[in-house]
Amino acid sequence: MSDVLTRLSAEIDSRRHSDASESYTASLFVRGDDAILKKVGEEAVEFILAAKGDDNGHLVSEAADVWFHMMVMLSAKGLGPADVLNELQRREGVSGHAEKASRQKED
């Protein structure tokens, strides 16, 4: 499964310096972090609204949109899916309450 994320991440990275008039992804990079974050937020809201319905295909489609735009933001920050997967692996087997408490101590 992570092979898809790896390939998509590489494609997103390769689009960073593409022609923004020909690449949606490049246009996001050109418009900057705020535009990317706005899209992440919009897609997250669409995901939430889809989750309120009964169409699982629509929900999955909206989840893919959220993931894609999050991956664009990660790329803009020099990060990728491996960073997120490593964090999830770090949290594996740790109680959600304990993990949250450990983050609060770091703040």
Image: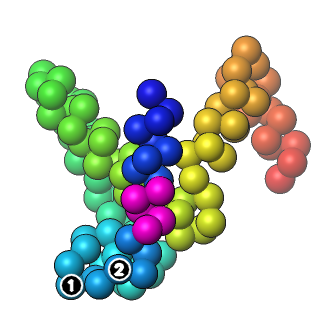
Image quarter where the N terminus lies is: top left
> Does the segment drawn in magenta span residue 80?
no
- Residue 31: x and y in percent read 37, 84
**Numbered label attached to residue 107:** none
Q: Residue at x 29, y 49 (%)?
A: 65
Q: Which residues are magenta?
A: 10-14
Q: The residue under label 2 is which amino acid type? A: Ser
Write down the quadrant of residue 85 in the picture. Answer: top right
Q: How is the image coloured?
A: rainbow
How many circles with numbers are drawn on the protein?
2
- Per the picture, the main secondary structure of the magenta-coloured stretch is helix
In the displayed structure, would residue 9 be above or below residue 31? Answer: above
Q: Measured from the top left, where is residue 25 in percent x and y?
A: 32, 69
Disc 2 to disc 1, C-alpha distance:
9 Å
Instruction: Decide: is 76 above or below 7.
Output: below
Q: Residue 46 at x, y = what percent?
A: 23, 47
Give the residue drawn at x 22%, y 32%: 59
- Choose top left, top right, bottom left or bottom right for residue 105: top right
98 left or right of 36 in image: right
Instruction: Report helix, strand or loop for mark 2.
Output: loop
Give left or right: position of 59 versus 30. Answer: left
The residue that label 2 is drawn on is 18
Q: Is 37 placed left or right of 102 in the picture? A: left
Q: Nearer the viewer, mark 2 or mark 1?
A: 2
The residue at 69%/37% (across/down) is: 86
Q: Secondary structure at mark 1?
A: loop
* Number of the label disc, if any, that sits on residue 21: 1
